[in-house]
Amino acid sequence: MISEKAPAKINLTLDVLQKRPDGYHEVEMIMTTVDLADRIWLKPLDRGITIRSSERYVPNDKRNLAWQAADLLRKTCHISHGVEITLDKNIPVAAGLAGGSSDAAATLRGLNRLWNLGLTLDELAELGAQIGSDIPFCVYGGTAIASGRGEQIRHLPAPPNCWVLLAKPAISVSTADIYGGLDVSAIRHPDTAGMMAALETADYGAMCRQLGNALEPVTMQLHPQVAVLKEQMLKFGADAVLMSGSGPTVFGFVQHESQVARVYNGLKGFCPEVYAVRMMGERIHLA
């Protein structure tokens, strides 16, 4: 049995450029990994794919992205034996943190080792793109700008060191509903180039100022508690706050450890899931 870490991601920026002919949206987003992670355990089986999870809301069949990743890799590489995948979940489900995509990416990396396939991260990312738009980024981890429908990855420097406070309200958000409610002509576009410059110069203040998510107004209109959560996080002392992905998780940056307890304890008063973690931001390397 082997294991693989599956870190969560947050969006420093998320911009939607246009609707594509294939039904997806053309996006441009800067993502980075944080030190909140699932742990994936892979155990060889004679045949078939089974999924076990510590989280009862996670599907244990072919709806699960990790199952789909294992199935695709088996078929692509003509593997006859199977695998039992155990998901030790720490990332909230349906939260805008790419938990399912990161599980699938970790499954690809782990099975690459378990089955001695010798594939590169580029090859694994290409396979992952067939399953989900966030999976290519999650294969690499680190910090990157993703474009196209999310599958085109360009690596960026890691963000300046800081604490990240994550808070997920007790709701789940459908990404399809959020994109369905988006008026592309009315989008307030984040400054992607400005965020790239902040990362290049490791400028914490500029990074905070350039946070932006084009999906935020749609999610907040459907779920006003997301807007309330942003306001509260700022009130408790976060330096900058943004919703990640299509939500509903909100994250805030604090630069000094002395700020962490105040923001964390304030949020715990009215939000069920709160995490204080560090930036990761560095790329994953194959073992």
Image: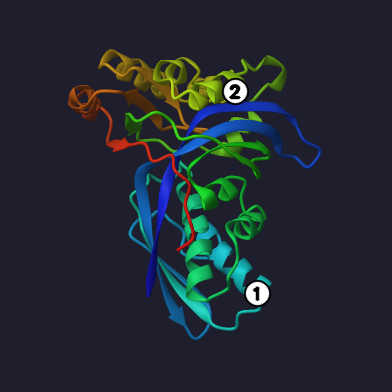
Mark carried by residue 183: none
Identify the secondary structure beneath mark 1. Answer: helix
Instruction: Tell me residue 46's x, y (percent).
Output: 49, 86
Q: Nearer the viewer, residue 137 or 168?
A: 137
Q: Quadrant of the image for the C terminus?
A: bottom left
228 versus 246 height, above or below: above
Residue at 50% x, 34% y is 157
Q: Amino acid at mark 1?
A: Cys
196 versus 115 height, above or below: above
Query: Which residue reaches farthest bottom?
Result: 46
Distance in Å between CA atoms under marks 1 and 2: 38 Å
Give the mark count. 2
Residue at 46% x, 25% y is 223
Residue 64 in view in this figure: no
Colouring of the image: rainbow
Label 2 neighbour load within 10 Å: few <14, some 14-19, many 20+: many
Instruction: Tell me residue 34's x, y (percent).
Output: 39, 40
N-terminal of the pair, mark 1 or mark 2, is 1
Instruction: Tell me residue 153's x, y (percent).
Output: 63, 42
Q: Amino acid at mark 2?
A: Thr
Which residue was labeled with disc 1?
77
Label 1 neighbour load within 10 Å: few <14, some 14-19, many 20+: few
Q: Nearer the viewer, residue 250 or 110?
A: 110
Residue 93 in view in this figure: yes
Identify the secondary structure beneath mark 2. Answer: helix
Residue at 54% x, 19% y is 217
Q: Quadrant of the image for the N terminus?
A: bottom left
Along the horizontal axis of the image, is 175 left or right of 183? left
In which image quadrant can residue 152 be found? top right
In which image quadrant can residue 205 be found? top left
Instruction: Tell me residue 40's x, y (percent).
Output: 40, 62
Which residue was labeled with disc 2?
192
